[in-house]
Image: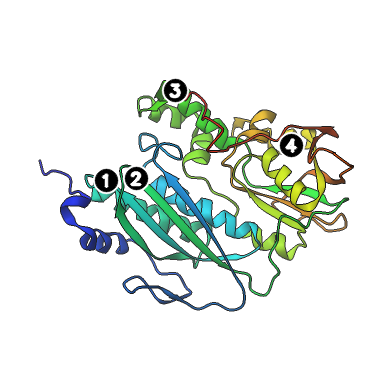
């Protein structure tokens, strides 16, 4: 039986050749991978964002397939671009890994990156990056997007009277993570025993956690629909709502009844309010719209923007002060860890 080819055995040039063979160019590409920089054709202003994932705190290969990991790496960055009201244009991917990493794993990660771009942001693609060595698999993605003449949708534009609306899955990713720690981990150490059964019983929650499908196209829709503020809900609805509120100098009042009605059941999975508010990693879009605006299709109303009184809470739940909670890599431990 032939042993698995590793990154250390093949070397950087051959590994990069194999990875690049699995990536389609972005439509904006004028010069792709192979030179010191890629060259892209941009019209007007651009947005740029970066995100890093490290094996251990951010993902576990016992749970993620390589394809799912590549998909998630793309999706989580594309959603940041969408939250600014921009069209995703291109990604760069910097990957570091141990020398004994199978080359096939990096190839499949590249396939996941490519597939997510094609499905979620047609025309976007990977235009370059870097490959290096590290004790654990680490990936840093940079995403670029074009505003196409629109002003960026920032966090600081919400005004009293605006409608708060949300688009995408909500709470499912947090449920998926809790299930993984409960059934596919021993004392916080991930394993794949029982993983297939877990995927069969909770496909929506596992998919939302391992390979999310954020509503990328709705970022442009929200911008064209008059959104006054918007962000990607990556750390939890409550903590990200509070971020909009603080930036805008207002309070965001989330309606528990509206949340339960709109998101209490998703794809056959029952989602409790606590998971919706604090679960994290949903990568949906939370936006504020003027009260006279018609909400774009795909957005559901979940609250309202209130004037914040002196020393008032940035987050309200049904009119009462709420505690913003969610993911913080330095202060929060995953469930079961």
Query: In which quadrant is the N terminus drawn?
Result: top left
Circle nearer the N terminus (3, 4): 3
Q: Are marks 1 and 2 in contact (CB under 8 Å)?
A: yes
Task: Name the residue carrying label 2.
Answer: 137
x and y percentages locating residue 68 in the rendered image: 41, 45
Q: Secondary structure at mark 2?
A: loop
Spatial CA span between label 2 and label 3:
24 Å
**Distance between mark 1 and mark 3 Cα atoms:** 28 Å
Mark 3 neighbour density, 10 Å: few (under 14) some (14–19) many (20 or more): some
**Secondary element at tag 4:** helix
Secondary-structure class at tag 3:
helix
Classify 301 as above or below 294.
above
Q: Nearer the viewer, residue 19 or 134?
A: 134
197 horizontally vs 84: left or right? left
Residue in the foreground of this view, choosing between 151 and 19: 151
The relative height of residue 88 versus residue 35 in the rendered view (above or below) is: above
Does residue 300 appear in this view?
A: no
Q: Which residue is mark 4?
A: 259
Sequence order check: which comes first, mark 1 or mark 3?
1
Q: CA distance from mark 3 to mark 4?
A: 28 Å
Residue at disc 1, secondary structure: loop
Residue at mark 1: 98
Which residue lies under the disc numbered 3?
183
């Amino acid at each position: 039986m032939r042993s698995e080819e590793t990154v250390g055995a093949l070397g950087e040039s051959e590994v990069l050749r194999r990875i690049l063979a699995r990536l389609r160019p972005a439509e904006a590409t004028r010069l792709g991978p192979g030179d010191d920089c890629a060259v892209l054709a941009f019209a007007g202003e651009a947005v740029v964002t970066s995100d890093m994932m490290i094996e251990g705190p951010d993902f576990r290969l016992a749970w993620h397939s390589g394809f799912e990991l590549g998909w998630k790496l793309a999706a989580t960055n594309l959603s940041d671009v969408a939250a600014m009201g921009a069209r995703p244009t291109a990604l760069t991917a910097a990957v570091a890994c141990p020398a004994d990493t199978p080359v096939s794993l990096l190839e499949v990660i590249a396939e996941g990156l490519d597939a997510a771009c094609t499905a979620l942001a047609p025309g976007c693609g990977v235009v370059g990056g870097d490959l290096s060595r590290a004790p654990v698999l680490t990936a840093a993605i940079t995403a670029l997007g074009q505003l196409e003449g629109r002003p960026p949708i920032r966090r600081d534009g919400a005004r009293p009277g605006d409608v708060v609306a949300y688009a995408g899955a909500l709470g499912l990713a947090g449920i998926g993570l809790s299930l993984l720690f409960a059934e596919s981990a021993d004392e916080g150490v991930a394993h794949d025993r029982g993983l297939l059964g877990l995927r069969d019983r909770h496909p929506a929650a596992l998919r939302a956690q391992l390979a999310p499908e954020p509503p990328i196209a709705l970022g442009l829709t929200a911008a064209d629909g008059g959104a006054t503020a918007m962000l990607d809900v990556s750390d939890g609805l409550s903590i990200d709502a509070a971020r909009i509120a603080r930036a805008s100098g207002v309070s965001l009042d989330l309606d528990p009844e509206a949340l339960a009605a709109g998101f209490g059941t998703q794809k056959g999975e029952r989602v409790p309010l606590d998971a919706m508010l604090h679960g994290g990693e949903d990568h949906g879009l939370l936006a504020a719209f003027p009260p006279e605006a018609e909400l774009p299709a795909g957005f559901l109303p979940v609250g309202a923007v209130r004037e914040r009184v002196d020393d008032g809470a940035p987050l309200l739940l049904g009119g009462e002060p709420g505690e913003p909670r969610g993911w913080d890599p330095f202060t929060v431990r995953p469930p079961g860890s």
